[in-house]
Image: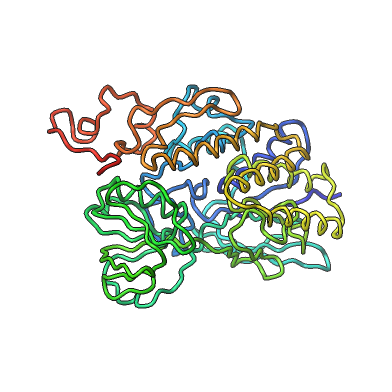
Amino acid sequence: MARQRIAIIGAGPSGIAALRAFESAERAGAEIPEVIAYEKQSDWGGQWNYDWRAGIDQYGEPVHSSMYRNLWSNGPKEALEFAEYTFDEHFGRPISSYPPREVLWDYIDGRVRTTNVKDKVRFSTAVRWVEHHPDRDMFTVTVEDLVSHQTTSSEFDRVIVSTGHFSFPNVPDFQGIETFPGTLLHAHDFRGAERLADQRVLLIGASYSAEDIGVQAFKMGARSVTMSYRSGPMGYDWPEGMEELPLLERFEGETAHFSNGETREFDAVILCTGYLHKYPFLSSDLALQSGNNIYPAGLYRGVVWQENPKVYYLGAQDQWFTFNMFDAQAWYVRDLIMGRAELPSAEQRTEHLNSWQRRFEEVGGDADAVRFQAEYIRDLIEATDYPMFDLDEVVRIFLAWKADKKKNILTYRDKPYPSVMTGTLAAEHHTTWLQELDDSLERYLSTPEETDVEKVVRGADAPEVHTPDAGR
C-alpha cells in the first residue's frame, strides 16, 4: 500500500498539535504518513505569532493573527498546559499563571524546537483551493508560494484544516456609523492600547475582546471606556472611568445613542463583534458553516467532517480549553488516519453527533459549558494514548478564574494557580499586571531589583507618579 499523504492547512497551535501528534507516534517507532503543513505566515504560532502589520502583510495577504501588543493570557496557563510538555519542563522554574504573548509563543515553539517537525512546514505559502475528486477519493491542494509567486498543486489522501476561526471579522452595520469622524476598527486590527491614551473609547461587544481591550485601554490611560452590550452586560465591578451601556442604536457624528436613551461622545470605536467561520479555500461541500459555539454541527467528535470523513477540523470550537484540547483532537485525528482508531459508519456518527448535540443544547451557562468541554476532551483522550490529566481540576480552576474576575477585573491576573500536571504553584510576577508595561520575554523572566512603576518605566530618579487602582 502506498504511503498516505496528509495536508495540514495552518501551523498555529492546532496545526502544531497535529504535527506533534505524528511526531510522537514516529518517535515511538511507528511509520507515519507523509505530512506537509502549509502556513501563510513566515513563522508558526498562529494568533500567538504577533506581527506589527495590521490588515495586510508584505505579500498583500490578509494578516490572520488578531494578536496585539501587551496582550497577556486572560486565562490561567494551568488550564491550557500541554499534558506531555509542561511549563516546568520548558522554563525550568515556576512562572506566573498569566504570561504575556511572547512567553506563550516561546512555550508553544519550545515543545517542538528540538524535533524535525518544522521541516514539514512550508512557510509563506497560502492554500488557494482544495478540491476533492470522488472518483479517486483524493484531494488536490493548490498553493501559492508567496515569496516566489509560484502556484503548484499536489494530491493528498486526507486534509486537516487547522486555520482556526478568529481571522475573519464579523462586522455588523450601525445606523450613522459612516458619520463617525474618529478612529474606527475591528478588534482583529487592534494592535495596541497606547494610541488610546486620553481618548474616549467605545467597545461594541460584551465578550473577551471587549473585556480585555477595555482594561488595556484603561491601563494605558484612556480618558473613558464604554462597552455596549446586546443581550446582557459582563457585570464586572468596573473602576471609575469604565462603564457598560445597553445596545448601541445609532451614531450622529461623534455622538453615540444607546437603547436606554443615554448618549456619549467618543474619539475611538472598536468593534468587538466576533468572527466568522470562513474557509475561502474550501468548496461549500467541505466548508464548516457554524456559529461560534462549543459543539459545531457537522463535526463528528468535534473534528471529523461528516459529509467527507477524510477532512478534519482542529480547534473549530468556541474555546474554554485551548492548547490541550487541540492536542486531544490532534491525537485522535492522527489515530484515525493511521488506522489506530476505527471510524464508525455514517449512521453511527450521526447518532453520536445527535446525542452530543442534545447535551450541548442543555448547557445553561458558563459553568455548564466548561464541564461540557471537559467531558468532550475526556471522550477524545480516552480513545488515544495522549496522557490523561485531571480535567475536573481544570474545571475548578476555570470557575475560580471566573470568580477572581468578578472580584476584581484589574487584579485577577496577579493570582497564582497550581499546575494540574505537576502540582507546582505558579510564581507571583515581579510586577503587578496593572503596573507592568513591558510584555517582553526578557523582562518577564528577569528579576529586577525595583518593581514599582516609576522606577521600572521612568528610571530610578523619576518623580513619584500616580498609578491606577480600582478607584481611578
Instruction: Give the camera-side residue of 39 and 319.
Output: 319
Residue 470, percent from left and from top: 30, 41
Q: Quadrant of residue 125?
A: bottom right
State whether residue 227 appears in this view.
yes
Instruction: Give the camera-side residue of 65 and 415.
Output: 415
Residue 91, percent from left and from top: 49, 26
Q: How is the image coloured?
A: rainbow
Q: Is residue 238 left or right of residue 370?
A: left
Direction front: furthest residue: 260
Instruction: Give the camera-side residue of 366 and 458.
Output: 366
Q: Is residue 150 above or below residue 110?
A: below
Instruction: Give the camera-side residue of 221 and 144.
Output: 221
> Looking at the image, which residue is at 17% across and 36% down?
465
> Looking at the image, which residue is at 56% across and 60% down?
126
Q: Can you say which quadrant of the picture contains the C terminus?
A: top left
Q: Is residue 380 above or below residue 123?
A: above
> Looking at the image, which residue is at 38% across and 29% down?
429
Residue 151, percent from left and from top: 58, 65
> Looking at the image, which residue is at 76% across and 38% down?
382
Residue 138, percent from left and from top: 77, 62
Q: Is residue 351 left or right of residue 328?
A: right
Q: Is residue 180 above or below residue 450?
A: below
Q: Is residue 36 left or right of residue 350?
A: left
Q: How many marks?
A: 0
Q: Is residue 431 above or below residue 1?
A: above
Q: Quadrant of residue 322?
A: top right
Q: Quadrant of residue 268?
A: bottom left
State whether residue 160 appears in this view.
no
